[in-house]
């Protein structure tokens, strides 16, 4: 009897928290997890890995019709380089098509397999807006056999930067070593540890065909936080990925790994939006993921398949 009394009180308390006449709001409150931010992060991470893979291939003797080698400081190593990539040559993964107008790639090369890159994306498209320029500053990259390892942190990202100053990569030996040490940081194996990283590791698997980036696959691990505020709402989105796999054979969804999305939203009117969902990426190429566990406004999706499109 006490158990039922407690449950009735809990249900009554939940009803009181919603505004009057809120049956429709209550219905709208519970929904599938929002995966748009996760998809956007995957797009930018894969595009960064793609550009790094092409730059590494060029420095190892490959040539591409859509890449212009603008300059190189000297024939040997160490050296600095500048390349221009037209992105209309990107056909796989197909979700990268039209993501940006072109990419300027500046590199400070320690040797043929180790580089610190600065990238400038022109006319970078997100789902909601277009940025004239997005700069990624001093990204460490190393080639290990057929795999390329890239470390991308939130602090590296600049919106509408000054191109000339950003492309001047002037680092001391100590600063170069510090950047490269980021690649040695331990990869989080726990999704709830990854969400605190504020950085992502991008592993590009070239399959031994550096002349054909279209067949590269990608593994993403890391996490971070996004904050979005409007006149009437404020929303914090925390997200994480562990071993999320993107395959050239599927442009619909990630085909492996785990992803977490946690949303905390406050509206000027209405009920606070709170929801956490742990997603399991599936090998089926159908634009969906399994909900491994969910709470709050995502609780109704527990054990269900939900959209997770790239």
Image (cartoon, helix red, strand yellow):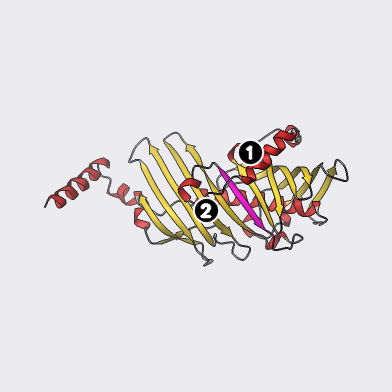
Q: What is the C-alpha distance between the residues marked 1 and 2?
A: 21 Å
Q: Where residue 215 sits in the image (x, y, percent)?
A: 68, 63
The residue tagged 2 is: 242
How many C-alpha atoms fall within 10 Å of the one at disc 1: few (<14), some, or many (≥20)? some
Q: How many marks?
A: 2
Where are the magenta residues, as a range? 199-207
241 and 84: which one is in front? 241
Dividing the picture into quadrants, the one containing residue 198 is top right
For the residues bearing labels 1 and 2, Cβ distance under 8 angstroms: no
Relative side of 22 to 209, left or right: left
Relative side of 16 to 272, left or right: left
The residue sitting at 69% across, 47% down in the picture is 141
Residue at the limit of the structure toward the right, as seen here: 75
Q: Where residue 74 sits in the image (x, y, percent)?
A: 87, 42
Say if the magenta span includes residue 180: no
**Which is more N-terminal, label 2 or label 1?**
1
Q: Is residue 26 visible?
A: yes
Which marked residue is nearer to the observer: mark 1 or mark 2? Answer: 2
Secondary structure, mark 1, is: helix
Q: Where residue 244 sits in the image (x, y, percent)?
A: 54, 56
209 and 229: which one is in front? 209
Secondary structure, mark 2, is: strand
- Disc ID at residue 156: 1
Dividing the picture into quadrants, the one containing residue 22 is top left
Relative side of 148 to 80, left or right: left
Location of the C terminus by quadrant is bottom right
Relative side of 23 to 43, left or right: left
The residue sitting at 63% across, 38% down in the picture is 156
Say if the magenta span includes residue 205: yes
């Amino acid at each position: 009897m006490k158990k039922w009394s407690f449950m009735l009180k809990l249900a009554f308390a939940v009803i009181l928290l919603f505004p009057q006449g809120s049956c429709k709001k209550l219905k709208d409150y519970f929904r599938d997890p929002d995966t748009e931010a996760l998809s956007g992060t995957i797009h930018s991470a894969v595009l960064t890995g793609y550009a790094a893979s092409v730059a590494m291939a060029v420095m190892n003797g490959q040539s591409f019709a859509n890449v212009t080698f603008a300059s190189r400081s000297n024939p040997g190593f160490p050296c600095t380089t500048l390349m221009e990539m037209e992105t209309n040559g990107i056909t796989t993964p197909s979700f990268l098509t039209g993501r940006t107008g072109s990419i300027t790639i500046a590199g400070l090369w320690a040797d043929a397999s180790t580089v610190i890159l600065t990238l400038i994306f022109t006319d970078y498209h997100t789902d909601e807006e277009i940025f004239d320029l997005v700069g990624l500053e001093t990204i460490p990259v190393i080639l290990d056999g057929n795999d390329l390892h890239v470390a991308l942190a939130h602090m590296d990202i600049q919106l509408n930067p000054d191109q000339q100053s950003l492309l001047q990569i002037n680092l001391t030996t100590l600063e170069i070593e510090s950047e490269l040490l980021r690649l040695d940081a331990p990869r989080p194996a726990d999704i709830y540890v990854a969400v605190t990283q504020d950085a992502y590791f991008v592993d590009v698997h070239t399959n031994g065909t550096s002349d054909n980036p279209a067949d590269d696959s990608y593994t993403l691990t890391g996490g971070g936080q996004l904050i979005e505020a409007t006149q009437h709402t404020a929303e914090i989105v925390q997200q994480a990925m562990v071993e999320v796999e993107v395959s050239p054979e599927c442009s619909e969804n990630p085909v492996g790994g785990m992803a977490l999305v946690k949303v905390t939203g406050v509206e000027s009117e209405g009920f606070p939006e709170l929801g956490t969902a742990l997603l399991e990426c599936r090998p089926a190429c159908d634009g969906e993921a399994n909900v491994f566990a969910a709470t709050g406004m995502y609780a109704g999706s527990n054990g269900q398949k939900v959209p997770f499109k790239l």
